[in-house]
Amino acid sequence: MLSKSFALIISILATLVSSKKIFIDNDGMSVNQLLIPLYAGYEIVGLSMSFGSSSVVDSLGSCYTLLENYNLTSCIPLYKGAENPLIQTNDTFHLHEDLFGELVWQGAFSTSYTDSYNYSSIVYNETLPGALALIEKVKMYKDTDPVVIMAEGMMTTVAQALSIYPQLVNESAGLWIMGGYVDNQYAQTTGDAKTIDVNTDINLLQDPEAAQIALTASWKELMIGGNVTNYLVPSQEFYDRIIDRAGGLSVIEDTPYFKPIENVIGTGNYTENGPDANYPYWGEVVAASIGYPDLIKHTTSTKCAVDTGFYSPFYGYLRIWNKDWAPTSGVRTGDCTMIDVVDYDPIYDMMIDILFSDWRQYCETGNYTGLAGYS
Ligand SMILES: *[C@@H]1O[C@H](CO)[C@@H](O)[C@H](O)[C@H]1NC(C)=O
Ligand SMILES: *[C@@H]1O[C@H](CO)[C@@H](O)[C@H](O)[C@H]1NC(C)=O
Ligand SMILES: *[C@@H]1O[C@H](CO)[C@@H](O)[C@H](O)[C@H]1NC(C)=O
Ligand SMILES: *[C@@H]1O[C@H](CO)[C@@H](O)[C@H](O)[C@H]1NC(C)=O
Ligand SMILES: *[C@@H]1O[C@H](CO)[C@@H](O)[C@H](O)[C@H]1NC(C)=O
Ligand SMILES: *[C@@H]1O[C@H](CO)[C@@H](O)[C@H](O)[C@H]1NC(C)=O
Ligand SMILES: *[C@@H]1O[C@H](CO)[C@@H](O)[C@H](O)[C@H]1NC(C)=O
Ligand SMILES: *[C@@H]1O[C@H](CO)[C@@H](O)[C@H](O)[C@H]1NC(C)=O
């Protein structure tokens, strides 16, 4: 009994000393997207998992699997976010493709998409939908530790929250997003299918109206992790560093705690994984930039808006302007800070350190420890 109440006091203290708060909306979850904020000392006050590149059940499922693996379910609340875009439907999405060209990546609107998870194996907080949970958390901490919002999928959940509670822009610390590409036409034109894919802004294209609402709201800070998120990339060298740290591929395969590492390294062989498995670590760049702002080496202040004309080939594309030459009427523009340059090397190191840390006592103690035998 004594040790239990002692542990409780420690965990309350840990909550009190941790001052930075983050709320994450995503359309799926990878291990480092989840753990980088904790590693950087942020408390995750909520996760909402939305439709987008995955169906909503798969977004929830991939996140829940990670929370379970790292024993984080008791202190990180999981909510279901937006189940559909605001206006875009599966039909309009495909109609736009018929009119203006096919996308390489169609996310959960793809004709071949099938669910991988089943709700019966997922536990999440069904009391509130993600947008209301986001509002609740922002209100809760507005006077002490304003919540940073990180949106790594469509902007739907954020747009829903803004519609219900416009003060979100003043009561949160700001919005950071993955996506928001500009000047990528050459890459889309000259690259192979994978290059076209990663240079196409699916998060905005799948819900252009939500993107326009979220990216033109008057946030205290609006950070766009566009192009730079495409260049923190897997490589054989990175996979080898992970395998060496584990003491061999078989150790990773045979250790249940390392299960999430298999999603990072695939077979462990970059060539065998094939281009479709070796995607950039997009959300990880944004998460690391929030946690360690010194990693950001250059930014540009712009005015921005998202094309919401359905009969435009650029429906869902982000446009940026010089502040002095942006439209002042006709379209609402936002103040977007584009992240231009990020120092990637510390992020690779951080990701490996995170994978070989022990997170299973985090809810109890408020911190991680080294993993015995894998330093
Ligand atoms: C979306 O439309 C495509 C093409 O018509 C269809 O194959 C797919 O099953 C639809 N997906 C959903 C989630 O309705
Ligand atoms: C989900 O799991 C339940 C219980 O195991 C099962 O009855 C149901 O058919 C499953 N649904 C899908 C879509 O697989
Ligand atoms: C679910 O979320 C609501 C709203 O944030 C909260 O009041 C409630 O305590 C949560 N339930 C559980 C079981 O954590
Ligand atoms: C946010 O604060 C500014 C400055 O106080 C104010 O002008 C604006 O109306 C507020 N916006 C909302 C949506 O509350
Ligand atoms: C995108 O980012 C990469 C890596 O920082 C840089 O080399 C490239 O010039 C950028 N491209 C554009 C169009 O901004
Ligand atoms: C990866 O697989 C390729 C093709 O099977 C093979 O040629 C290469 O030697 C493998 N590389 C490593 C590091 O195992
Ligand atoms: C999992 O977390 C709980 C607190 O939520 C803690 O009591 C338990 O010891 C942890 N399990 C492991 C294996 O560390
Ligand atoms: C959490 O643990 C790490 C590694 O043991 C340590 O570097 C860091 O200072 C700790 N953070 C807190 C807030 O105690």
Image (cartoon, helix red, strand yellow):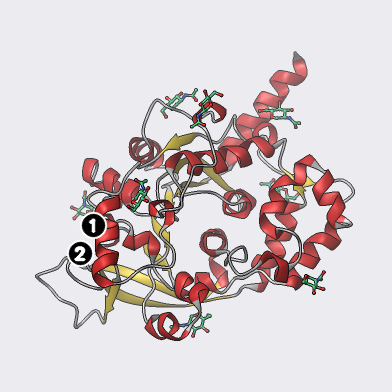
Left or right: where does residue 271 sit relative to residue 285?
right
**Quarter of image, res 163:** top left
Q: Are marks 1 and 2 in contact (CB under 8 Å)?
A: yes
Q: Secondary structure at mark 1?
A: helix
Q: SS of the residue at dot 2?
A: loop
Instruction: Report, in whole angstroms, how far the alpha carbon at label 1 lies from the one at label 2.
Output: 6 Å
User: In this rendering, does residue 134 appear at all?
Assistant: yes
State the residue lying farthest toward the left.
Answer: 330
Would you name the residue on which mark 1 appears?
209
Q: Residue at x 44, y 35 (%)?
A: 79
Earlier residue among tags 1 and 2: 1
How many residues crowd around disc 1 within 10 Å: few (fewer than 14), some, or many (20 or more)? many
321 to the left or right of 15: left
Whether residue 372 is situated above or below residue 3 in the rendered picture: below
The label number, if any, that marks residue 308 in the structure image: 2
Q: Which residue is at 62% across, 70% downward?
A: 233
